[in-house]
Amino acid sequence: MDKILAETRGDRAERDKEIPGVAVSMDELEALFNGGGAPSDQPPPPPPVQRPKQITVVLGRAKWDKQHLADFMAGKAMELDSLVGAAVEVLEDGHLAAMGEICRINGHNAVKRSLGED
């Protein structure tokens, strides 16, 4: 048995001599296998900054000329193209995000998302 092991070890030693290799450190191997490429002394980049979103609720629309706009003063009402209880648009940064309806919560106006919206 010892003779077989010695021959096996000898064969490996001969094979290792014949194949030129490149020494790779454990840090380099870990970096390669963990998706990092070459190891780096630099810290990872910070996560992207989450900026606040601008939410707008559109109750309705109206087309006015400059004179109507100039006459629009405190206490005057603007007639909109939507009816009371109609769905309102909820915009996120100017883009339609959902449809909803106006409701009251604890005495404050609120928007409840309409059913069936994704």
Image (spheres, grey):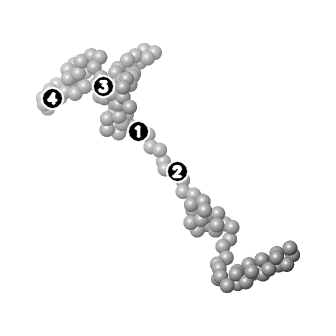
Residue 44 visible, this orientation: yes
Q: What residue is shown with label 3?
A: 88
Alpha carbon separation for disc pair 1 and 4: 29 Å
Q: Earlier in the sequence, mark 1 or mark 4?
A: 1
Query: Which residue is drawn at the image coordinates 60% and 62% (left, top)?
Result: 33
Q: Amino acid at mark 4?
A: Trp
Do the residues under discs 2 and 3 have CB atoms within 8 angstroms? no
Estimate how packed mark 3 is, as few (under 14), some (14 to 19) or many (20 or more) residues with alpha carbons within 10 Å.
Answer: many
* Residue closer to the observer: 20 or 56: 20
Alpha carbon separation for disc pair 2 and 3: 35 Å
Q: Helix, strand or loop at disc 2? A: loop
Camera-nearest label, 4 or 3: 3
Alpha carbon separation for disc pair 2 and 1: 18 Å
Q: Amino acid at mark 2?
A: Pro
Indicate which disc residue 47 carries. Answer: 2
Residue 57 visible, this orientation: no
Q: Helix, strand or loop at disc 4? A: loop
Q: Earlier in the sequence, mark 3 or mark 1?
A: 1
Indicate which disc residue 64 carries. Answer: 4
Camera-nearest label, 1 or 4: 1
* Residue closer to the observer: 66 or 115: 115
